[in-house]
Image (tube, grey):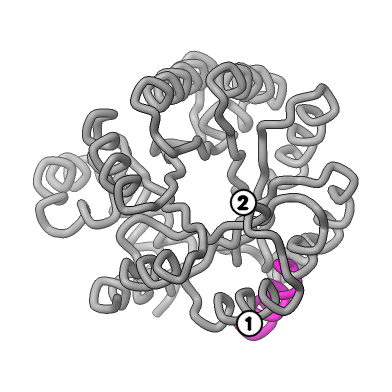
Amino acid sequence: MADLLRSSLLAAASNQRLNRFVSTHGRRFGADRFVAGETVDEFMEAVALLNRRGFRVAAGLLGEDVRTAEDARAAATQYLAILDRFARDRANANVALKLTHLGLAIDPALAFENVSAVADRAATVGNFVRMDMEQSAHTQATLDIYRRLRGGGVNNVGVVLQAYLYRSETDLSSLAALAPNVRLVKGAYLEPPSVAYASKREVDDRFGNLIEMSLEGGGFTAIATHDDAIIERSIRFIRDRGIAAGSYEFQMLFGVRPKLQDMLLSQGFPVRIAVPFGSQWFPYFMRRLAERPANVFFFLKSMWRG
């Protein structure tokens, strides 16, 4: 059943006719809850509203796995414009990007060149860039680029580690000397058992361990989850160990568990909302669901939960 659902979602993602129809009409049927429009102006309206309510924002320009250097450089140019817009509007927002959107699958040197340009612009305007983590095939290259940036004196960059990968605790330990700014997630890609834990119990346990390791590691920890049990465990640890308020934040997705987001904010916890936008929202959303079909039921359930 899961294989059938996955193949159906992937077929939908690549169906041009369906893509055109849904891109024209689909946002009226609920996509706007999860995607903040297709233009920078639409996105900035969402940013302003969230900022007024007390939330921080991470910008996600939809797109990944580009196939030409021209497209990769064009994506980097769009991020430069977003950073300039943040500065102009004095938005409490930073950038989260995928290195395959900047050319990682074409040439790691191209991705490094592009992300360096984005990080340099971010530094100029007093902002920050996070490099998202993608499939495990890109994990080492992403960490290599992060280390190269930090080794070159670029300190306004962060990275992501995925709890379900066997390697993640070792990776976090290896980054300790950098006092990294790291976002921790469970992991949403469909990975083989040779590289990733499969059971929810194992993933949750590793996720909690990673969070606690990072919180005590001297860097900055972004706890990216909507899981009540993980959040409660993290809060207990933060309070028990007296973790400084400026050394962590919770991160959640735009439109997912809004009541939980409000609750954390009302209790004084810093919360950053990852807000995706752009014209590539339909294939992006379908691929994310296809990579882990359980996400379908999670998102459907989230539409009815707070």
Q: Amino acid at mark 2?
A: Gln
Number of numbered callouts drawn: 2
Q: Tell me residue 135's x, y (percent).
A: 62, 51
The quarter of the displayed image where residue 141 is located: top right
User: Mostly what secondary structure, the magenta segment?
Assistant: helix
Residue 70, labelled with which disc?
none
| Dot 1 amino acid type | Ser
Against 255, is 74 above or below? above
| The magenta stretch spans residue 219 | no
Which residues make up the magenta segment?
197-211
**x%, y% of residue 146?**
74, 35
Could you say which is closer to the camera, residue 30 or residue 12? 30
The residue at the point 84 percent across, 48 percent down is 175
Q: Give yes or no for residue 204 being in the magenta stretch.
A: yes
User: What is the number of the mark on residue 135?
Assistant: 2
Secondary structure at numbered mark 1: loop
142 relative position to 257: left or right: right
Q: Which residue is mark 1?
A: 199
- Indicate whether 51 appears above or below 105: below
Who's the residue at 68% across and 50% down the image? 182
Q: Residues within 10 Å of mark 1 (few under 14, many from 20)?
A: few
SS assignment at label 2: loop
